[in-house]
Image: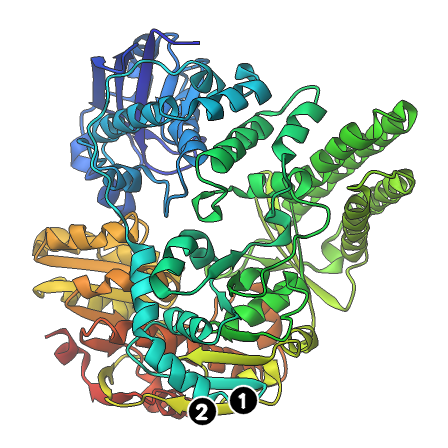
Amino acid sequence: MNYSEYIVLDVETTGVDARVDDVIEFAAVRLDAKGEVIDQLDFLIGTQQPISSTVMALTGIRPEDLSGQPEISTVIDKIRDFVGTAPIVGHNIGFDVEFLNAKGAELKNPVLDTLELAYTILPAQSYYSLEFLSHRFGFAHQPAHRAMADVLATTDLFRYLVGQVADLQATTRKQIISLVPADKWTWGWLVNEPPTFSRLTTHQIDEGESDQLAAEVKRGKAWAEEVLQAATDPINLVETHFAIAGDALALACAVVSAPAIVIVPDRLLYRINWAKLSQTVGAKVVPRYPSSLQYRTDAEVDLANSQESLSALEAQLITKVVIWRIEWGMDYSQLYLSREEQYQWEQKLAPVTPLDEPTDAVVVAAAGNLMDIGSFQNRVVVTARPLMMEDAAFADQSRIFSVNYFTAAISSRRDFVHQYVRGSDVKLADSLFKTLNHLSGSFQTITQSLVEIYTAHPPTSVYERNIELASEWLPASLSEALREAAGHVQKYLEGISGVSAPAALSQIERTRKLLVDLQLVAELSATHRYFLFADANRFFLDIVPTQFDPQPIRRLIGTAGRFIATGSSLSAGDQFSYLRGLFGDSHTQTLGLEPRTELLVAEDMPSGTDYYAALQRFASQVLSQPGRTVLLANSAYEARQLFEDVFTGGTTTGTVIESYDTVGNVSLVPALVAQHKKFFLIGHYAWFDRLSPYANAFDRLLLGRLPFEAVSRPQAKVLADADEGFNTYTLPRGIMRLKEVLHQAKLTGRPIAFLDSRILSRDYGRQVTAALLDFTIVPQGSDRIIE
């Protein structure tokens, strides 16, 4: 199906909730069949709502710009007339259409989302935002979070993606067409018959992240030799302060001692081209993806042939797999999967038995999938992320219920019955379908009850996100629904027990796990704690153990030939006791302490509730100073609040202010900073891991309060509540997180200041300063720090 016209549109809004927030700008262009602009419409729209600092920073639209502009009700007919019946194209276009329809547009046009298409046909990108993709491919039009600028950038992206589909090999398109009916996915028609758009001139910008990491690994081999010489025991904690990032050093250690396993952050596993890195470092480096994401040969063909009617998600996934297999050579670094697609892959494309892993290479494993590894097989294991290993082990002992979990639990079991039962036993299949329908009804009741509980007992602090369930809050209807759900799952389990299909064993195992999870919630067991977050018609229920058991991770480490944790943040105070408590008896050593770096510490910042007001005053004073500054708040909440409170100050001082929310993709930061002599970026500690490769674009780095863990995090709630929890969990992890960020900041060569006087005045401050082995502490008044 080729359309004769397309409408590309975008709106700017006062918020993200279409039910209560307003549209403040509309823009659209009409494209002809060749993708050329033939008409356009754009205007501002008045509102009585306040315009937040975030919206002003993103759009440049200020309240005075909207004064005297028409209300949405007076222009909605003009919008509807311009759009007509043509398909609507946009990036995450569902957001825009939802807002317009909430204001009365009643648009029922076909909707074509360029975000969804980019996910499917582009090799994996670091980000998929319109800003990033426009920059990455060098489009003539760059988005500016103004409606028309975004529309023109989206038009460029649309034309580019159409060209990418047209350039697919004939074999690829033929295979997709044979497996996926064109009407099963909103973009299915595009593969069948791509329109003849005029070609877009682009110049692709290589991010170079794989090249940068490979160069760091090569540079770090000499330091890696020092680490390996120091790591003489089965379990080793070797803290290093070399001029290299921790993950690069860990990889270098693994390369030098290959075959080996290196444990890295999940984000790194999926963003690096490991085949390319292997060529540079001179060693075979292969990623280890979780068994649930391994690929069974011709699995997408089996899926297409086994279904009477594919869902849109299945059609999209099959399209993606065919492109990945034929065009990208089954390179996982080129594959992006959403959470929904990951679940579909696990259920329908993964092998029943996990594939064998290579034993002659450096295997890169994600920390988040640590407990998916059965054994390290006596190999050397290296990591710079021991706290992530602890988090993975805690998560393995926890459970999460959500609406998506319930939906997937039903849909995957319906798929199983349809694929493996219905063909041989229609009567059993019908009985199982009926049981699943009853289970779906119970899940709806559970969801409604949990949302009502959260609404009736909201968090008591702005820093809290979750509430801890109390037995007296559970209505009888919820308890009954949980028991009924468990009964339906038990009945389903009994029904599939005799199914002999290859996938039956994993289906039975997953169903038993679901039954145990439901029983855990129904009884509110004393061995677990239950933390609930809900919003509208969705919820997340974390079921976590009251006590963390380190034995599973110790048993796993015991299968290594040698385990080495390295990097800059292994000790708290002058002790390694925290990680010894996690991993067991360990050899410890510290390397590379010289030269020391000067760390300015504000000596006059108050503590407690007075701190934030002082931080706000400090940030306001920074605005009047020349130069480019980044300030890290201790939490995302504090960063957002600080940005809102100081944003207007940038207008009077001529300083451009951005936050981690408004700046877009961190890879764009250097170009953005270079445009302004006075620039102030507000972020938070956890975000700095992404910003750090680009942080040398700034003149100075300011660090807020100690990065203690978020109080809303269930793991922190449980472990910090233990006896002496502050000293045994909160403080040591806060120190180690601080040391990690300080090391990243140190590598930039820029001046660093720490805005937390407690390390000079509190008893626990001595533990903090004792841990900063490669820094010289210089107390200084906050006014002098700003100068």
Q: Are marks 1 and 2 in contact (CB under 8 Å)?
A: no
- Is residue 628 placed above or below 231 in the rendered structure? above
The structure residue drawn at horizontal position 45% and vertical position 82%, both measured from the top left corner, is 570
| Residue picked out by circle 1 | 577
Indicate the amino acid at tag 2: Gln
Q: Residue at x 75, y 59 (%)?
A: 471
Q: Nearer the viewer, residue 680 or 156?
A: 156
Horizontal arrangement in the rendering, residue 162 relative to residue 470 (left or right): left
Can the viewer see residue 102 in this picture? yes
Query: What kind of element bears circle 2?
Result: strand
Quadrant location of the N terminus in the rendered image = top left
Q: What separation in Å lies between label 1 and label 2 (alpha carbons)?
A: 13 Å
On the image, numbered disc 2 is attached to which residue?
589
Badge 2 local density, few (<14 within 10 Å), some, or many (20+)?
some
Residue 712 in view, yes or no: no
Count of numbered circles in the view: 2
SS of the residue under disc 1: helix
Q: Foreground: 548 or 189?
A: 189
Q: Nearer the viewer, residue 369 or 454?
A: 369
